Image: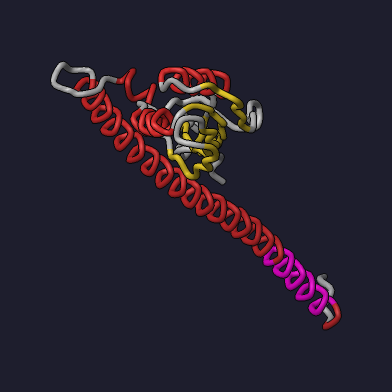
Amino acid sequence: MKQPVTGKALNLGKRQKIEKANNAILVIVAVAAVFVSMALVTCNFLWKQIQHNDRVYKKEKSVSNLLKENVTSAQNLSAQYQLINSSSSVANAQTILDALPPTYDNPDLLASIQTVVEQSGLSLVSLTSTDLNGQVSDMSATPAPVQIPFSLQVSGTYQQVNTLVTNLENTIRPMDVEAIVLSGTDSSMTATLTVNTYYQPVKSLNVSTQEVK
């Protein structure tokens, strides 16, 4: 004969079912949370990857455009160089280099000045300049003429001094006579000249790498 089911037993069965249902819900929620977290992490990674790829693409496009401009500039420069060295040009490339040397050449400069003085029929009393060898660069990202000042003192006639000034100004290398101090007579004169000349460093190619973050 079956025993009657009491109210206490019925409540216990319902509680077990509720606990099982709650546990199942917790498991489902936990699994869903894991999937949502994974989805968020994945989406965040993909979004960052898309942004990184976009930055890389923009940099590559910028570099590509720069390379195209450089190729065009190189072709134009090559054409100009060939034109300069052609027979129709007044001066060739070597003449231009002599006019504006790409290096600081203080000893050669002083030797050439002495030659000009002798060709003018004068006696060189003194020739001074500040030797900047090792202190100036022969390369620059933005080349521009660099001033080289020097001073010289000569003795001779007034006409010979006048010839020296003319010869300096007519040299292939640019010479700016800034000041002249004269003393003596027309036939026996001492002249002190302050002069500037120039050189222009060669253009440096600044090749570098850049990390795109």
In the picture, measured across the screen, residue 162 lies left or right of residue 83, that is right
Query: In the figure, residue 62 lies in which quadrant?
Result: top left
In the picture, measured across the screen, residue 44 lies left or right of residue 77, that is right
Number of marks in the image? 0
Q: Nearer the viewer, residue 27 or 188?
A: 188
Q: Verify whether residue 105 appears in magenta.
A: no
Q: Residue at x 78, y 70 (%)?
A: 16
Q: Nearer the viewer, residue 178 or 174?
A: 178
Region in magenta: 9-25
Question: Where's residue 187, x and y in %?
Answer: 46, 30
Q: Residue at x 36, y 27 (%)?
A: 171
Residue 114 in the image: above or below residue 177: above
Magenta segment, principal secondary structure? helix
Q: Is residue 209 visible?
A: no
Q: Verify whether residue 15 appears in magenta.
A: yes
Q: Nearer the viewer, residue 190 or 10?
A: 190
Question: Where's residue 6, x and y in %?
Answer: 84, 80
Q: Nearer the viewer, residue 120 or 156?
A: 156
Q: Residue at x 59, y 59 (%)?
A: 36
Question: Where's residue 77, x and y in %?
Answer: 27, 28
Q: Is residue 171 visible?
A: yes
Residue 185 in the image: above or below residue 107: below
Q: Quadrant of the N terminus?
A: bottom right
Q: Residue furthest bottom?
A: 7
Q: Residue at x 13, y 21 (%)?
A: 88
Residue 173 in the image: above or below residue 4: above
